[in-house]
Image (tube, helix red, strand yellow):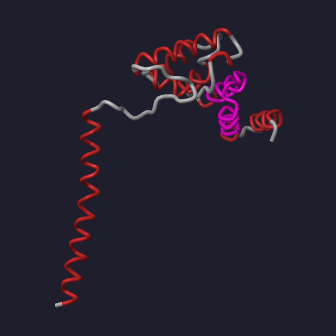
Amino acid sequence: MPLRDTVARVDADLAAGRVPVARQRLRGLVSSFPNDLMLRRRLAEVYRLYGEPAEAGRWMYLEQDRDASETAAFEARYRTAPQRMRALAWQGPESLAQSAFARQQLAAVRAACSEAMGHPVDWDTPPSSRKTDSRGSAFADFLAGAGCLVPVLAFLAIWVNGLVALFD
């Protein structure tokens, strides 16, 4: 379905009070057209109806006329540059942004993320959410592996015991 038709459906959904359906349609549109600032603005408006300032701030982050309290709520929810980079869900270079302010914001987030990661990153391959250099994570991975190994060994022991009992 063309973008124009889907936006018309969003308008109809909002007029009929079907805010969750409108939000779902807009999320799909932003996913399909991540560089369209108008769609991001519309999604922020819907999140304002829900009373979710962090999400409204997320989708208005690239707009110069954004609300400072919404931006602060977004930055509080997504504390690190890699988290913000993933949350913004931009695709392609900053030059695709429709305004100088958006290009500046995107470049600042990407630069902060590159600094935090210790290597250059781009919008097409945002950093994963998994911590790569964490001792606690390695211990948790060990415990998870051991937790899976114990039932497998117990199953094998019961199976071997049954096999031995079968031939006795």
Residue numbers of the magenta segment: 22-48
**Residue drawn at 23 percent across, 82 percent down:** 163
**Residue drawn at 45 percent across, 18 percent down:** 114
Q: Within the image, what quadrant is residue 26 found in?
A: top right
Q: Quadrant of the N terminus?
A: top right
**Residue drawn at 73 percent across, 22 percent down:** 38
Vertical side of 95 occupied by 78: above or below: below
Q: Count up the numbered dots.
A: 0
Question: Farthest residue toward the front?
Answer: 119
Q: Position of residue 19 (x, y in %)?
A: 68, 37
The answer to whether 130 appears left or right of 135 in the picture is right
Question: Farthest residue toward the bottom?
Answer: 168
**In terms of depth relative to the viewer, which is nearer, 155 or 118?**
118
Vertical side of 66 occupied by 78: above or below: below
Question: Farthest residue toward the left?
Answer: 168
Q: Position of residue 108 (x, y in %)?
A: 53, 12
Vertical side of 64 occupied by 91: above or below: below
**In terms of depth relative to the viewer, which is nearer, 133 or 35?**
133
